[in-house]
Image (cartoon, rainbow, N blue to C red):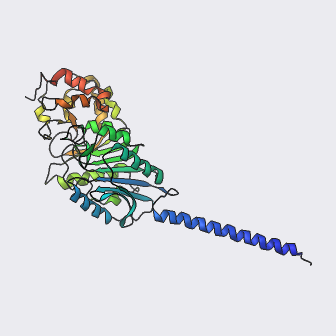
C-alpha cells in the first residue's frame, strides 16, 4: 500500500491541532480555578449565599470593632459555596476582606472614605452584586444607631458614626441598590416599626433591637458558619441569631429583639384605628438623650377598631416572626409625639411608615400635639 506524503503531513497537522485544543482547554480550566481560589473578582462562580458584614468603627466603638474583627478572623467557613465579605472601617483606613476557610484575606483597600454616606453604601453593594453572584444575599450593619431619628440633630445618629458623620435611614435605604434576603441591624434602637417599614423594599427579613444594644453586639460570639449554613432554612437561621442574643443578655441586661417579614407589612394600611385615651407612661421605653421618643408597639392595640381586629391579628402573625423582651411589652418600638420630642414631627412625616398609614396625622390630630400631652 502506497501512502502519500500529504497523508503524513495532514496527520501531523491534525494531531498538533488536537494537542493545541487540549492545551487551551487545560489552561482555561486552570484560569477558572485560579479565579475561584484567588477570591478577588469571582464572577464565574455562583455562591449559595453571600453575607456582607459592614463594620463602621471610626468612632468610640473602635476597640469593640477590633475584637469583632479578630473573632471573624478565627471563624471557620469550610464550604466553598459560602461567601462572607467583611468591610472594616476604622482609624487605620477602610478595607474589604473575604473570609476564606479560617482567615480574613484583604480584597480591596478604599483608603479614607465616609462609610456613613449613602454614596459609599451604594458603591459597595453594587460591587458585591457585580462580583459575587449568589442565590442569597444578607447584610449585617454593625455600628452606632438611634433608629429613625434624623441625623441633622447633632445628638442623634440614624446609623453609623464616621468621624462625626452619620447616615440618615431614608438615604441609607435609598442607597441599597437591590433587595437583600435579610438585614441584621447590629446597632442600638433600630428595632422600630419606622425602620422596618423604611427598609421593607430592601430586605425580606429584618432583625433589630428597640433599645440599647450592649457593646458586644447582636452577632458577636456567634458562629457565623451557622448563619450561612444553607442546609437550614433562612427563617430558622435568623431565629437562631435572635435566640442567642436574647438568652445571652437577658440575665445581665435589658434584652429585646425582633425579626420581621416585610412581605405583609402593608397589611397595616387596612387596619382602622379609633379614638382612645391612653396613659402612655405604661408603654415608654427609656429616654434617649433625655427625650421620650420610643414607645412599645403594643400601644397600637388600644386604637385598633374592632371591625378590623382580624386584619390586625393577621398582620401581627405574618409580620412578627420573632419577638422577645425582658422589659415587658411587644419588643418593637413606635413614635408617639409629646412635648419633649415634637421637634421630630416634620422629619417624621417623610418616613414611609407615616406616609403609608398616616400615623402622625391620626395620633397627632386626636391626642398628643402640643396642647394635649397626656404624658404630663
Determine which quarter of the picture holds residue 92: bottom left
Residue lying furthest right: 1
Quadrant, the N terminus: bottom right
Q: Is residue 290 visible?
A: yes
Q: Is residue 93 above or below residue 118?
A: below
The one of 329 and 85 positioned closer to us in this rendering: 85
Residue lying furthest left: 376
x and y, in percent, of residue 54 in the image: 32, 52
Residue lying furthest bottom: 1
Q: Is residue 305 visible?
A: no
x and y, in percent, of residue 44 in the image: 53, 57
Residue at 26% across, 36% down: 193
x and y, in percent, of residue 325 in the image: 19, 45
The one of 274 and 342 positioned closer to us in this rendering: 342
The one of 247 and 374 positioned closer to us in this rendering: 374
Is 362 positioned to the left or the right of 86 in the image? Answer: left
Residue at 40% across, 55% down: 230
Amino acid at each position: 500500500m502506497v501512502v502519500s506524503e500529504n497523508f503524513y503531513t495532514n496527520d501531523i497537522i491534525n494531531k498538533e491541532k488536537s494537542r493545541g485544543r487540549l492545551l487551551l482547554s487545560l489552561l482555561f480550566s486552570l484560569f477558572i480555578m485560579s479565579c475561584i481560589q484567588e477570591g478577588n473578582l469571582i464572577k464565574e462562580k455562583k455562591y449559595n449565599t453571600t453575607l456582607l458584614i459592614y463594620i463602621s468603627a471610626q468612632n468610640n466603638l473602635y476597640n469593640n470593632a477590633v475584637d469583632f474583627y479578630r473573632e471573624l478572623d478565627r471563624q471557620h467557613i469550610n464550604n466553598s459555596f459560602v461567601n462572607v465579605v467583611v468591610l472594616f472601617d476604622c482609624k487605620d483606613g477602610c478595607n474589604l476582606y473575604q473570609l476564606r476557610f479560617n482567615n480574613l484575606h484583604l480584597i480591596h483597600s478604599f483608603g479614607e472614605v465616609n462609610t456613613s454616606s449613602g454614596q459609599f453604601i451604594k458603591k459597595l453593594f453594587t460591587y458585591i452584586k457585580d462580583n459575587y453572584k449568589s442565590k442569597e444575599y444578607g447584610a449585617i450593619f454593625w455600628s452606632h444607631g438611634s433608629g429613625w431619628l434624623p441625623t441633622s440633630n447633632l445628638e442623634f445618629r440614624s446609623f453609623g458614626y464616621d468621624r462625626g458623620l452619620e447616615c440618615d435611614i431614608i438615604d441609607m435605604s435609598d442607597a441599597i441598590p437591590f433587595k437583600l434576603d435579610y438585614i441584621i441591624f447590629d446597632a442600638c434602637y433600630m428595632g422600630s416599626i419606622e425602620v422596618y417599614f423604611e427598609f421593607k423594599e430592601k430586605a425580606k427579613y429584618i432583625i433589630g433591637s428597640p433599645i440599647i444594644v450592649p457593646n458586644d453586639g447582636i452577632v458577636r460570639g456567634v458562629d457565623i458558619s451557622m448563619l450561612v449554613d444553607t442546609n437550614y432554612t433562612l427563617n430558622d437561621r435568623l431565629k437562631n441569631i435572635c435566640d442567642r442574643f436574647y438568652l445571652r443578655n437577658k440575665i445581665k441586661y435589658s434584652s429585646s429583639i425582633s425579626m420581621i417579614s416585610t412581605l405583609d407589612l402593608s397589611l397595616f394600611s387596612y387596619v382602622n384605628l379609633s379614638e382612645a385615651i391612653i396613659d402612655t407612661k405604661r408603654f415608654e421605653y427609656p429616654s434617649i438623650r433625655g427625650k421620650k421618643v420610643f414607645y412599645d408597639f403594643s400601644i397600637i392595640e388600644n386604637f385598633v377598631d374592632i371591625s378590623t381586629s382580624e386584619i390586625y391579628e393577621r398582620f401581627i402573625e405574618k409580620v412578627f416572626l420573632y419577638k422577645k423582651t425582658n422589659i415587658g411589652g411587644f419588643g418593637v418600638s413606635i413614635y408617639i409625639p409629646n412635648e419633649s420630642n415634637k421637634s421630630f414631627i416634620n422629619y417624621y412625616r417623610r418616613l414611609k411608615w407615616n406616609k403609608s398609614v398616616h400615623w402622625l396625622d391620626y395620633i397627632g390630630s386626636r391626642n398628643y400635639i402640643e396642647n394635649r400631652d397626656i404624658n404630663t
